[in-house]
Image (cartoon, helix red, strand yellow):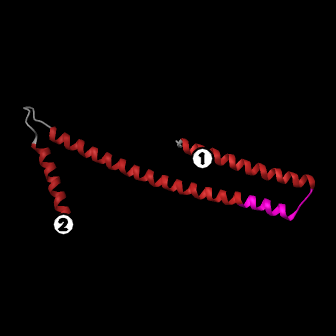
């Protein structure tokens, strides 16, 4: 959802664009009406259209830049969400292992041993890599 400030900017851009197009059509209509084709007017109209085209190109560049930044931001957010989900699953699994009890209420050692084994293997792997 676009921010209100962006909506205002977009609206003002649209107003400017329509004003330029309206002015251009008005000048073209006058030229047709009087059938006057002065070189000065043509250069003036050309500069207006060139300005409009230049502004349009600049607008497209900015739009592409914003879109690229948005995609990068979304990719980072997705990666962060995946890491969080993986962490929560691991945490839940460890909780189940640690909270397991026998029918007499004693903690089950199998789960605790598995967790300790994983930690030892992880530390050994990290020390071998270094």
Q: Secondary structure at mark 2?
A: helix
Find out whether the residues at labels 2 and 1 contact each other: C-beta distance under 8 Å.
no
Q: Mark on residue 9?
A: 1
Residue at 40% x, 49% y is: 78
Indicate left or right for 105 with 32 as reference. left
Q: How many marks?
A: 2
Image position, residue 99 (x, y; %): 15, 38
Q: Where is residue 11, by image quadrant? A: top right
Q: Earlier in the sequence, mark 2 or mark 1?
A: 1
Indicate left or right for 92 with 72 as reference. left
Q: Secondary structure at mark 1?
A: helix
Residue at 13% x, 51% y is: 116
Image position, residue 14 (x, y; %): 67, 47
Which portion, as a residue range, is magenta? 35-50
Residue at 74% x, 58% y is: 49
Tell which of 72 and 121 is nearer to you: 72
Indicate left or right for 104 with 32 as reference. left
Tell which of 96 and 44 is nearer to you: 44
- Picture layout, residue 105 above or below residue 53: above
Quarter of the image with the C terminus is bottom left
Q: Does the magenta segment cover residue 75?
A: no
- Picture layout, residue 130 above or below residue 94: below
Indicate left or right for 78 with 122 as reference. right
Question: How many residues crowd around disc 1 within 10 Å: few (fewer than 14), some, or many (20 or more)?
Answer: few
Q: Does the magenta segment cover residue 47?
A: yes
**Predominant SS along the magenta part:** helix
Image position, residue 7 (x, y; %): 58, 43
Residue linked to disc 2: 128
């Amino acid at each position: 959802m676009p921010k209100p400030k962006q909506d205002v900017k977009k609206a003002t851009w649209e107003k400017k664009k329509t004003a330029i197009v309206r002015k251009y059509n008005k000048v073209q209509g006058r030229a047709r009406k009087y059938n006057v084709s002065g070189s000065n007017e043509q250069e003036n109209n050309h500069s207006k259209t060139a300005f409009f085209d230049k502004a349009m190109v600049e607008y497209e560049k900015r739009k592409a830049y914003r879109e690229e930044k948005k995609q990068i931001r979304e990719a980072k957010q997705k990666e962060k969400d995946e890491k969080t989900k993986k962490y929560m699953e691991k945490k839940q699994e460890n909780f189940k292992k640690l909270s397991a009890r026998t029918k007499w209420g004693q903690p089950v050692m199998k789960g605790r041993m598995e967790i300790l084994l994983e930690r030892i293997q992880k530390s050994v792997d990290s020390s071998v890599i270094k």
